[in-house]
Amino acid sequence: MIVVLFMMPITLPKIRRKESVRELYDVVIVGAGAAGVSAAIYSSRRNLRTLVIDKFGVGGKLLEAGLIENYPGFTGILGPELAQLFEKHMTKFGAEFLVDEVVNINKFNGMFIVDLASGNSVKSRVVIYCGGAEHRKLNVPGEDKFLGRGVSYCATCDGFFFKDKIVGVVGGGDTAVSYALYLSDICKLVYLIHRRRAFRAEDILVEKLKEKDNVEFIIPYIVTEIRGEGKVESILVKNRENDAVMELKLDGLFIAIGYKPNINALLSLKPETFGAGYLKVDERMRTSVEGLYAAGDITGFEKQLVVAAAQGAIAALSAAEYVRHGKWK
Amino acid sequence: MIVVLFMMPITLPKIRRKESVRELYDVVIVGAGAAGVSAAIYSSRRNLRTLVIDKFGVGGKLLEAGLIENYPGFTGILGPELAQLFEKHMTKFGAEFLVDEVVNINKFNGMFIVDLASGNSVKSRVVIYCGGAEHRKLNVPGEDKFLGRGVSYCATCDGFFFKDKIVGVVGGGDTAVSYALYLSDICKLVYLIHRRRAFRAEDILVEKLKEKDNVEFIIPYIVTEIRGEGKVESILVKNRENDAVMELKLDGLFIAIGYKPNINALLSLKPETFGAGYLKVDERMRTSVEGLYAAGDITGFEKQLVVAAAQGAIAALSAAEYVRHGKWK
């Protein structure tokens, strides 16, 4: 028994891993990124019986983020460090946490049934869906084949494997430019490949990147193929204006070209969506399905940590009113 | 010279106190609470020339707040401590800070003129108004007379003056119940006077308060008079259901019954308002006046720290687009 205790992860002291079938909760929160964590804090502080479910752990995209400088109050903190603070905060007021994957959510007699990959399921009066959005793929030859052998979607996870090597980063948003900045500090050379001449990224980031003498901007180019034998050795890129083609020798390619909303578990409920499959919410974070709230990247709003956290808080406050008074609108 | 340097407040190392008249900024942010701080971080990271103006300093209501437990990432931090972190963060990316009072804002030829109590004024292409909302008064005899002599709107500022004494708290929201909780730890007896039987406050707070044996709930009662000679000695309270009147002997009265939006400086611009004078904004934090954004308590949305911070971020991101592209809608 004591051995088991010592084998539990010491950073997760207050987390209970639930095994129970069809337990009844007031609020089930799907996803433990910033939105889910904040929803759990607010929901449990309203004394609602709250369960958070995430297949990976607490932190969401923070787990693969580098230095965070724009979450007010933290002038600079590494993503995984902030994720640890979130984890501690999430369960402080009684919210439970379960590591499992939500595969389907249905609704019977006004009650949500949340089915899990483990075969278990839980019942809840309210669901706050914070399923986030996943990395979008280039869909070019070699991308899947070389995943983990030079192709990565997370520079802060895998960057260090490419110390003193040559890498490429694909994309023009905050993530891509942040990746390139980070990689320029540890790699010999960084290509930033972007399909447009303008960047969506924060100007301050682009300017910082332009000051780096080991960063080459490859614009306006797209990647058409990833080549190698056993691992990435080069990429083909094509100029979008004049169709010029180049082969760039490199050891790694980091792809940061956007997101795809994680909405599969909700398909049975048929919530209203827009764009790439983002959930439509109103200002109280209500979806088109009674009792179903959403917060964070899945709502297709600004993908900012502090915005996700605020949306989680608002969803939980709305849900608390709904659980107490039963009035949806 | 060196003497002057040492006399500067050591907690404000990066803050420049501007004296210049009619300087041109991209963004002027009025108010340095959570919304203004966050707007400044985002605006300066977008490389916009940014000035924050506040008549008191950085932190807004945090400066009078007790323990903050619901700002995700900080499991528990005192308001003034978080305000210090905000202050450091606000100016980290180049935003300037000015301690002055904004008395009027006008618009000429597409440019805002922000007039200050000092007699100076500044010009800006965009204004993000985070003026907040002030404490609402009871408007009963004795309230003004005994302000600072027993009457207070800030328990965490003044509570300690009433150590081992008897105090009252008026209100039923989070602020009132938090005040009562805090005061119950240092005072001999705390009356919580609330006009309704139900509380708007978080249940977890109300339950904690009910566990305290030195807290008396006076509900549903209103305060009709504050009495004393030179300082508060008692209050008259009246039962709202049966008109019963009691006189409660006490040494201090903390009033926490809501807020009044600080909108006077905007009257020339005639922005659309609602309710008690809150600014109407859309989801991009635009008011009805082109170039004028608002964030935080002034928007009349959830008065939560993390929500104000998110609104500030959104306002700044919207403003950055407007400054760059000139398109309002």
Image (cartoon, coloured by chain):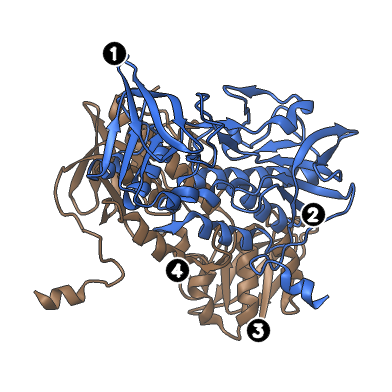
Chain colours: A blue, B brown
Secondary-structure class at tag 1? loop
Q: Nearer the viewer, residue B236 or B314?
A: B314
A138 w.r.t. B135: above or below = above
The percent coordinates of residue A100 (x first, y second) are: 75, 48
In this figure, what is the number of numbered marks? Answer: 4
- Sequence-wise first label, 1 or 2: 2
- Sequence-wise first label, 3 or 4: 4
Query: Mark 3 vs mark 1: same chain?
Result: no
The residue that mark 1 highlights is: A242
The residue that mark 4 highlights is: B81
The residue that mark 3 highlights is: B188
**Chain to which the residue tagged by mark 2 belongs:** A
**Chain to which the residue tagged by mark 1 belongs:** A
Query: Mark 2 vs mark 4: same chain?
Result: no
Amino acid type at circle 1 is: Asn
C-alpha distance separating marks 4 and 1? 56 Å
**Chain to which the residue tagged by mark 4 belongs:** B
State which quarter of the image contains the N terminus of chain A.
bottom right
C-alpha distance separating marks 2 and 4? 31 Å
Amino acid type at circle 3 is: Lys
**Chain to which the residue tagged by mark 3 belongs:** B
Residue A49: which numbered mark, if any? 2
Q: Which residue appears farthest toward the front when viewing the image? A: A229
